[in-house]
Amino acid sequence: MKAIVRRILPASLLSVVDLRSEMKSLAAMQRQNVEATRLRRRLPEFRALDLAPEWDAVTQELEPLAIGDKSGAVNPGDRRAIYYLARALKPRTILEVGTHLGASTSMLALALRNSQVPSPRLVTVDIADVNGPRGAWARLGNKYSPKALVGALECDFVDFVVSPSIDFLRQCVSRFDLIFLDGGHEALTVYQEVPAALKVLNQDGLILLHDFYPNCEPLWSDGMVVPGPWLAIERLRKDGGPIRAEPLGALPWTTKRDSNVTSLACLLAG
């Protein structure tokens, strides 16, 4: 019944319902401690990179793999931003939370490969078996699973992990230069993910957030809002966390709905 109601409600009303529910659950959450000493303070100048020829080559390489723009996949403009940002940072180790179809996974893997850093490593975590026969790639009619995608791109340094994100982060003994949080977007989840992610971040590392809607206001004409990430960061800041989220805002290329707006945001110290 709940699923049926959500399908018939307009996006604007659905966003209000979600916002109230998220705020109520977050208010009851025990305070999290935030250690941000390893978090970088400034966003790298990724927009200024002269990567057009390289991006054209990447696009041609990806075209026969037909990743597409299926339900829940990162839109093409955001994929380009993720690639450019990773190329600007030149990380050696990357953690992605939320593999899904492997769209952003492919971008991060290609950025690592093309940066030619020594001993690159990408770990991508999802609560579901994204590569299995019942994974989203199969249900949505994609040609390749995420593992097959990175295999076709000759990125043999990608590890796929099936685990709840918070469990993985709290048990992880590795550290990463870049962490992309794009798994569960509920405020309670992000509120716990961020402090745990900060503990496995390398010095001067960066955390990238997806579906970040500042002040819980719509970014596109559909009126839809995902309130969780913004609410979680605001609660962490209210609790005294020395962090700030810097939305990437307008990009030099199209994202979705004939706009160049993105919901990507970088978590920075300060």
Image (spheres, rainbow, N blue to C red):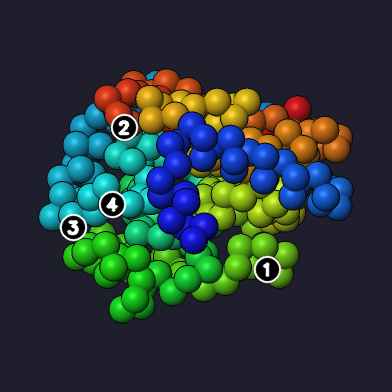
Q: Gap in Å between the C-alphas at discs 2 and 3?
A: 21 Å
Earlier residue among tags 4 and 2? 4
Disc 3 + disc 4, Cβ < 8 Å: no
In the rendered structure, which amino acid carries the disc numbered 2? Lys
Earlier residue among tags 2 and 1? 1
Q: Which type of secondary structure does the marked residue at label 4 adopt?
A: loop
For label 3, the residue is 65
Q: Gap in Å between the C-alphas at discs 4 and 1?
A: 28 Å
The location of residue 23, given as percent across then percent down, is 72, 41
> Badge 2: how crowded within 10 Å, few (<14), some, or many (20+)?
some
Give me the disc on residue 256. 2
Task: State the residue in front, 169 or 228.
Answer: 228
Give me the disc on residue 167. 1
> Badge 1: how crowded within 10 Å, few (<14), some, or many (20+)?
few
Earlier residue among tags 3 and 1? 3
In the rendered structure, which amino acid carries the disc numbered 3? Leu
Disc 2 + disc 1, Cβ < 8 Å: no
The location of residue 145, given as percent across then percent down, is 29, 68
Give me the disc on residue 70. 4
Which residue is at a point 51% across and 50% down the rendered structure image? 182
Which tag is nearer the camera, tag 2 or tag 3?
2
Q: Which type of secondary structure does the marked residue at label 1 adopt?
A: helix
Whether residue 68 is visible here, answered yes or no, is: yes
Which tag is nearer the camera, tag 2 or tag 1?
2
The location of residue 136, given as percent across then percent down, is 34, 65
Q: Which type of secondary structure does the marked residue at label 3 adopt?
A: helix
Which residue is at a point 60% across and 68% down the rendered structure image? 164
